Every structure is written in C-alpha cells, then in structure tokens.
Amino acid sequence: MDFCGRMTATPIFLTLLLATAGANAADKVSLELKWFSQFQFAGYYTALEKGYYADEGLDVQIHERDPKKFPIDLVLGGKADFGISDASLILHRMHGRPVVVLAAIFQHSPLVLLTRAEDVLLGPHELKGKKVMRQKGIDDASIAAMFDHEGMVTKDVIDVPHSFDDMALLKGQTDAQSAYITNQPFLYEQAGFPIHIINPTNYGIDFYGDMLFTSERIMRNKPNLALRFRRASIKGWKYALDNPEEVIGWLLEKYGSKKSLDHLRFEAVETARMIQPNLVEIGHLNSGRFQRIANIYRTQNMVPQNSDSEGVDYRDYLQADGRMSQWILWIGGAAAAFGILTLILLTLNRRLGTLVEERSRDLKAARDSLQSYVDIVDKHIITSSTDTQGRITYASEAFAKISKYGKGELMGRAHNIVRHTDMPKEIYRDMWKTISAGKGWHGEIKNRAKDGSAYWVDVNIEPDFLADGSISGYTAIRYDITDKKHIEELSVTDRLTGLYNRLKLDETFTQEMERSTRYDHPLSVVLLDIDHFKSVNDTFGHQTGDAVLVKITELLTENIRIIDVAGRWGGEEFLIICPETTLEHAVDLANKIRIVIGDHVFPVVGKKTASFGVASLASGESEGNLIARADEALYRAKKGDRNRVEAAS
C-alpha cells in the first residue's frame, strides 16, 4: 500500500475499531453510593433501569452506603470502580490521594447544618462548645471550610460521629446535625419540629455537591470504560429529572427506598435546584471552579501550601491536544493531504467553538448564580447601608420585613427611625465614635418596628472606604435574635408577672451593692407583702389571685422610678431595689405605692392592702444582712395593723 493509501486507511481502521468496541462482553463495574436509595441518586438507577449502562457495554452493580465504609476508600482500594462524593474529593487529591472527578452532578452543595429552633443556634460561632454531628473529613467539605472561614478551629466544637439517624436533633443526640437541604428538613417539618438551617453558602462557601468519581488507575488504564460510565450516567440523570414520578416508583417498588412518596417528591424538586439543568449541562466541570475551591483549602491551611488539585479533572487524562498536535505534524509532512488538513482545521474550529460555548455557558451560569445569591441575600439577610450622616441608602427586603417599613419608606430616612427608647443613648454614642474612627462595631440592639413592636438584632457595622481612604458610609449586617432574647428573658423573669425573678434580682442586687460601695452612694430596698392574700386564693381561687398579682405588678411599675428595679421575691412578696436612694426617700416611695394599692378596686376581690419593710445599706453591710433588716421591718408592719410602712433601724 502506498503512503496515501495508508493515510486514508488508518482513520477508517480506527473508526471501525471504535465502532466495534461495544460489541465485546459487558464490563462488570460497581458504583458506591454515599447514602441509601433515594432521589439523590436517581440518575444512576435510571441509567440501570432504562438500559443506558447496557447500551454502553456495562454490567453495573449499585451499592448503597455502608456506614462503616467510605466510597473514596473503596474506589481507591480497588473494591469499587466508581463512587459518589462531594468537594472533599479535591481536598483528598491535594493530600495526594489519586481520585479523579468524572462529573459534577450537583452544581451546588446541599450540605447544611441543622439546629433546633428552640436552641437559637443561628450561626457557626454559636456552635462553639456544642456537639456537631458530621462525617468529619469524609462528607463535610463545605462545613469544614465554613468553620475555618469564620476563624473557628477544630477544638471549638465537639465533633460527634454521625449516627445516620435523620431525626438526631429531635432525639437529643446532638446540638447540630449535618444534613442535606434536599432531605432532612422535610422530615422535621413533617414531625412539626422547628429547626434552623446554617448554610455554608451564606458564609461565602459555594462548593460542588455530589460528584461522580473514579480512581487515577482506571482513568489511565481504562479511560474508555470511565467515559462510557459517565455518558450513560448523565443520560440517566436527564431522563430522571424529566420523569421524576416514574423514577420515584422504581425507588419505592424495586430499590427499597425507605422514604415516603411525598418525601421523594420533595427531594426531587430540591435535587433539580442543586443540579440546575436549565442553566448548566448536567455533569459540567469548570476547571476554574476547581482552582477556586483549592485556593480556599490552601488559604484556610486545610492542605499543604505547595499542594495543588492537578489530576482531579478527568479531562486531564484524555490528552486530546497532544494527539491532535502529533496528528497534524504527521499529516503536514504529506503535501498532497490538503483535504485532510482542511478537515482537521474544521475540527479545530468546531472545538474552538465548543470551548467558547462552554465558556459562555460558564459565564451565564456564574451570572445567574450570582443573581441568585443576590436575591437570597436581599430576602434573608437583614442588611442596610447609610451615608456618613446615618441616612439609609440601601435596605434589603429582609430589613424591610423585620422593621415592617416599605423599602421606599426607609430610603433617605435617618437610621434612628427604628431606634427603641429602651436602648441607652450611651450605646449609640459608643457606636458612632467607633465607626467614625474607621473601625467595626458589634453589639446587640433592641429596635422598634413601624407598628411599635420590638425586635432584637445582633449587628455588625463596618465603614465603607473610598480609594483615598476616606469613609463614604457604613454597611450593617444583622441577625434576628428576638427569639434568643425572649428565651433569655424567660430565664430571668417571673412567668406570671413579667417582673425579674429571684435569680435575676439576686444578680442585680449584687451589682448595685458593688456600685454603691465603690462610689459611696446610697442604696435602699423595699420589701412588700400583700395583706391576707391567702384568703383571696382560698375564697376566689388561684386564677383570681393571679389576676390580683398581675394588677399589683402594673401598679408597681407605674409608680417606681426608671432607675428602680422591681421583682417578685416569692409568692405574694415583691422586692424593689432603689439605687441612689436614702432611707427617707425609700420610705416615701413605699408610702406612695401603699396608698395606690389601697385605693385600687380589684375585680371580684374589691380592695386590698399591702405592708412594707424598708432598709438602707449601712457601711460595710452584707447583702444578706440588708435584706434581713428589711424583712424584719416588714414583719413588724404585718404584726401591727398591716397596711403600713416600717423602716429598719
């Protein structure tokens, strides 16, 4: 055969060889799932059911997760050919483990942390000292990166091995549980158990989710096997997302999924959101994104600084460019092969067009993803910006929602539009002094909504700087801690009256004693007891007695000064702590309250009276002794005619 004949025959021979490759006996391979049968793995089950694997000459066994084994170890150990894992694959590669990613099925990680709503654990920092249940180093890449991004170290949390119990929070096994947003939240919602979701994406960690992977050994020795498996799996995912009800039927009837029909339907919808098939080709890999994830690992010292992720992308092993270059040089030696050269140039042009198309698709996906996060921030993060005078220049939808103002109402208004009168002015003075100096400020603030209701926020305020270093304004990010404050309030207040309870009174009393002693200022206390209160409960019942206590609470709070502290001392006894008050003035206050109570007509009961004991702090006196003297004075008042005020000697 002459040279030109060989040139023509070689491509034809290669074509025939490739065309007949699938005619051989089916290759037996196995896939290790990272969990149990559910819609999270619908594409692989679909490829099996619809014969896509068989069409590629593959005999596939799909294995559910064995909690005692890990897909990465099984694949690298040669006990499985393919596996499913998350962005920790990049971490393992950077530590020298020869894993190779074939496809990124989930473009965004569904991995989150769940906490009990009643615990008010709203973010990573509030998990310090708490139990966190996760698959550490195996399937927790985005969670580990979030902790590190927030400046937390391993010892900050108490790591608990994952029990693989979907309801671990409800059963009290842990304070925080790693979970998929596509899965466990549904179960807690169905159980009526309120939870809070801590999502790493809200802290700047946007990793790939489920990725199909194999070993470098297979990729080097059997690249065609890996490509066939990848191709069939992606085809299965396309069908599964278009026909979720059919796939759910298989999962329930044939593959023993333990989830309910409604749960699988919920998972199907959430899974589609993670895959984003309308924005990105299923399985699409972005080498730039691999590098960004690798950079996060390096920046956060999770890998050696000189490590890289080279070799983690299956395309690194195809060497198409090298073969194509050699092919061009070989053919270029034959002057008569212009037709073939033209064909190759057309192929190169088509490939270039494909690369441009992929880059455009990446840019569109990035733009859409960015817009998605902007929308998420606007809806869920309570943030605002002001100019240097404190006038609002931007307010998120979440800020408008919690403040109950419209966005239009907030723009241009002074930020003190939401200031609550309960907040001391000193706090705001300190805030402005700090941020005006170009420093960040952090604190807890009680605000007032448009309808007059109060809400609490944990706020971080940072100055915005121009290129010349001058301050152009301020940006504040807040977390709603109203529930947390409510819980704190419940722990220090009396449930019936809303006044401070005995525990909080003791704490406040100690603080005022120390202040009085340090600055040599007067301090007095007033103990009062409702006269003959037992007869109210015995005659009219405890509900009526409670109503009397609540009304007396109102009379007390209306007639004491803002610096005075009133609380329920026990039963029908109340204590009033009076800073900056002499014995004489404390007696005057007690008489004022005595008259107000005696003049009031209580429903059902009629008129009631109260007796008072008053004492003022003596030099060097202890807390216990001061209270004992006030109690002795109260005893004298009750032993006499009652409805009177007695001062301690």
Image: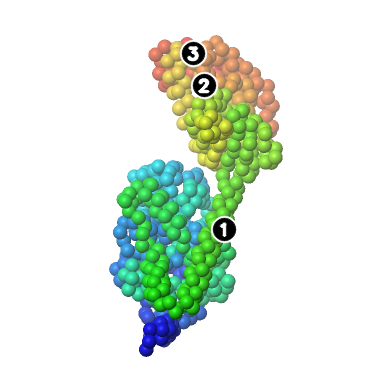
Looking at the rendering, in which quadrant would you find the N terminus?
bottom left
Give the secondary structure at mark 1: helix
Check disc 1 and report the residue beneath it. 364
Q: CA distance from mark 2 to mark 1?
A: 65 Å
Expressed as whole percent of the image width and height from the top left, the position of residue 435 reads 52, 29
Closer to the eye: label 1 or 3: 1
Q: Is residue 637 left or right of residue 88?
A: right
Query: Label 2 crowding class (10 Å Cα cut-off): few <14, some 14-19, many 20+?
Result: many
Check disc 3 and report the residue beneath it. 522
Reading the chain from its start, which is encountered first: label 2 or label 3?
Answer: 3
Closer to the eye: label 2 or 1: 1
Residue 531 quadrant: top right
What residue type is disc 2 on?
Ile
What residue type is disc 3 on?
Pro
Q: Residue furthest bottom?
A: 1
Residue 143 visible in the snapshot? yes
Reading the chain from its start, which is encountered first: label 1 or label 3?
Answer: 1
Residue under the image location 59 percent in, 29 percent down? 388
Residue under the image location 46 percent in, 82 percent down? 55
Expressed as whole percent of the image width and height from the top left, the position of residue 147 reads 41, 47
* Front residue of this view, candidates 350 and 315: 350
* Front residue of this view, candidates 58 and 122: 58
Expressed as whole percent of the image width and height from the top left, the position of residue 562 reads 58, 22
Give the secondary structure at mark 2: strand
Which disc number belongs to residue 577? 2
